[in-house]
Amino acid sequence: MQQRSNYFYITTFLFTCLLQCCTSTDTITQNQSFKDGDLLVSSNKSFAFGFFSPGASLNRYVGIWYNRVSEQTVVWVANRNNPINGSHGVLSIETPGNLVLRDQSNKNKLIWSTNVSISGSSAANSSFIQLMDTGNLVLFGGEGNRGIISWQSFDYPTNTLLPHMKQGVNRTSGLLWSLTSWKSKDDPGTGDFQFKMVLNGSPQFFLYKNSERLWRSGPWNGIQLSGVPDMTTRFIFSVDYVENNNEVSLSYAIHNPSIFSRMVLNESGTMDRLTWQEGQKSWVQFWTVPKDQCDYYSHCGAFGDCNPYKLGEFECECLPGYEPKVKSEWYLRDGINGCTRKPGEPLCGNSTRNDVGFIKLTSVKVPDTTNAVVNRVLGLKECADFCSKNCSCTAYTSANVSNGGSGCVTWHGELIDTRQFSNQGQDVYIKVTASELAEYVKNVKGSRHKKWIIILVASIALIVVLIFVIFIVLRKRKGRRHYIQELLSFNLSPPSVSSYGGSSLKRKQMDENRDLTIYDLKTISCATDSFALANKLGEGGFGSVYKGRLSNGCEIAVKRLSKSSGQGIEEFKNEVTLIARLQHKNLVKLLGCCIQEGEKMLVYEYLPNKGLDNYIFDKEKGELLDWRKRFEISLGIARGIVYLHRDSRLKIIHRDLKSSNVLLDANMQPKISDFGMARIFGADQMEAKTLRVVGTYGYMSPEYAMQGLFSEKSDVFSYGVLLMEIISGKRNSSYFNDDAVNLIGYVWELWKEGKALNIVDSAILGESYNPDEAGRCILIGLLCVQEHAMDRPTMSEVLSMLSNETSVSSISPKEPAFVIKKSSYQSDKTHTYSSSASLGASVDDVTITVVRAR
């Protein structure tokens, strides 16, 4: 009995303590002391204010951090350069209405203060401090407690930019809203890096290391910052840019306030946009600068243009009308000294002579506008006239590109820090002489089609001759020379030919820029035990896949093209030359290839868990993938496709995304495979058309299946089908009922009835199952399979929605593609296959290309 009584009192005491901790206020009044251990919590529980020690430090600081994020994430620090040694800090509002931090253990030493003064004793006595729901700490003061803001933390940022916080300049007070990095993870003191706005010319942001410029945002052009093409308002956030007599500032707001997203200036000197992913219990990076060599300020010097998409070539080139200033340095890939005007006529014109012109560069970050001249009244045509008549003018562009364009920006000297983007950049017009313009039109525009026709015809003829000659040589020669010539017949240039099988033949260094290994047939045969049936992993449209082990112990998967098949050669070459250039954790890694004695084989890293289809369509194995694991697999696949579409050096359209082409490693992490159908897009290319439709029926978008049109949105459609298969554990081609012949139609019918969660695989209805996430994924899947490509989101937007960065509650999908009843499907099947495109498709997940008679 006594033991039970003691247990009751202990439980009551703990509950009382917990209740006290949970009733933290968000306000400090005039007569209240705030000590180390006390806590302010905003009314929505999102932010907390108090004393903390960062990392491994024992020093105490006063700051603001996320209250509902399990990883301590500090967003503002008061005494960042003056820490307290020990827990004796006290914060209070002193006369005349000043928020003050003192160290009681050191003679009540002043550590930090808001340094404001409120006139009138009653005004000072009514001051109070409040932590707002936005994470802003506000000091209010005024007669009768009217809530006049006398100081706020948003005016004094540290290293973090929160939603609704401004970056820029207050022209009235002189305040500079800028970010400065911490010294280290353990020290929030002012570091070496600063992110601030410069008002000269056309206002723009710069990232500094001490006084050195590292990166430039470019000016606001009415839609976005010229150097930040990723700045978009669709689905994610809204941007507010203000430029008037009182201030010049930029701020952003998240559409869904429950999402935690922040911009942070790191100790390493990068600016990152991060969003908290509750499922992963970590911050996920969605944007960062600088991220490539062209992001660094003036990487190619004056009058240089940086193009990061020139694979294998020097990224720097000179603007039209200019040439390298120091050619010897240019040959060594050093463009820091930039370019200079080519010898010849000066850049000078007048109203009576047409001796100058302009060459338009598209999709660029405009040059540094620090010394540019801005005229908000002139239109683009008047801007061109002004620049052509001004001898010092070197280039011009629109000040505002929205609503057809307005305003005029002109440069009158060096053009610095110009760079190319793949899309969404800005047009800038470079001034050249009339003769240079004529030469440009003649060489670039006038002969473009003729030049490509000549190159194409000559290339085809050369390839035919080489293949014929090499074929004759290969039939007469053996050994190593035989092997190399056979490789050349496929136009492959691997970096080195090395054997893991112990061959005594020397390998030839063929291309130092790629990391692809060429294997001997003997090596592969030994690794797979002469392609033993016991090592066979599966069979696809172009041949079989075998497991192998090299002499160094490395496990491999060998994709062997069938000798009897005339198909797959182009796909084989495409995969060898393409996937070797791609590096991402969610893409399968190609180790090398083998082309010898009629054999054509690809060598991949071995993934023990094989294809995703082996799990989601199998009742027993499906139970191994709970909801959390399936959601993580969906995220991983999305990240891999975003890399292909946006982040890789090449813009890749996969064209054959399906469950069997997603492999799982030992940790069940997804890796996209089979790039035989993939195609490279140009930087500005939006779509392409083919008469040779390839892929797998059931995953094809309607515009591709019917018209041969493919784009990024084709992969989005395939991903939507795959996402619904992952959730439901059913194939899209499965029969459901008289109202739906496929999974898409079945999901749509359930969605209209408000029963979409009925498709969720019963195998994943366990502890990790999250119905809200499942519902969001089903909605995203329906958005991806919309009839029209323009109605589908991009994969970047899909990843954002999956990561809960973007609210999807207000989005309603239209009726998706291929929602047809059984009767109409059967009657129209023949018509569907009689498209003008040569449709090569497979219902049973076996990819084919062209149907041929036997």
Image (cartoon, helix red, strand yellow):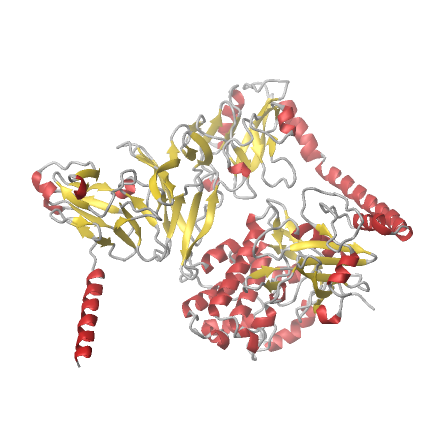
Q: Is residue 334 visible?
A: yes
Where is residue 567 drawn, in percent x and y? Answer: 77, 61
Q: Is residue 72 left or right of residue 517?
A: left
Residue in front for this viewpoint, 354 or 142: 142
Residue in front for this viewpoint, 303 or 444: 303
Q: Is residue 650 left or right of residue 77?
A: right
Where is residue 181 drawn, in percent x and y? Answer: 38, 40
Q: Is residue 649 left or right of residue 400?
A: right
| Residue sticking out furthest to the front | 2
Q: What residue do we see at 69% from left, 55% from top?
A: 690
Vertical placement of residue 39 versus 288, above or below: below
Where is residue 731 drawn, in percent x and y? Answer: 59, 72
| Residue sticking out furthest to the bottom | 1
| Residue sticking out furthest to the right | 476
Q: Is residue 820 visible?
A: no
Residue 847 occupies which quadrant of the picture? bottom right
Quadrant where the N terminus lies? bottom left
Where is residue 229 drawn, in percent x and y? Answer: 49, 43
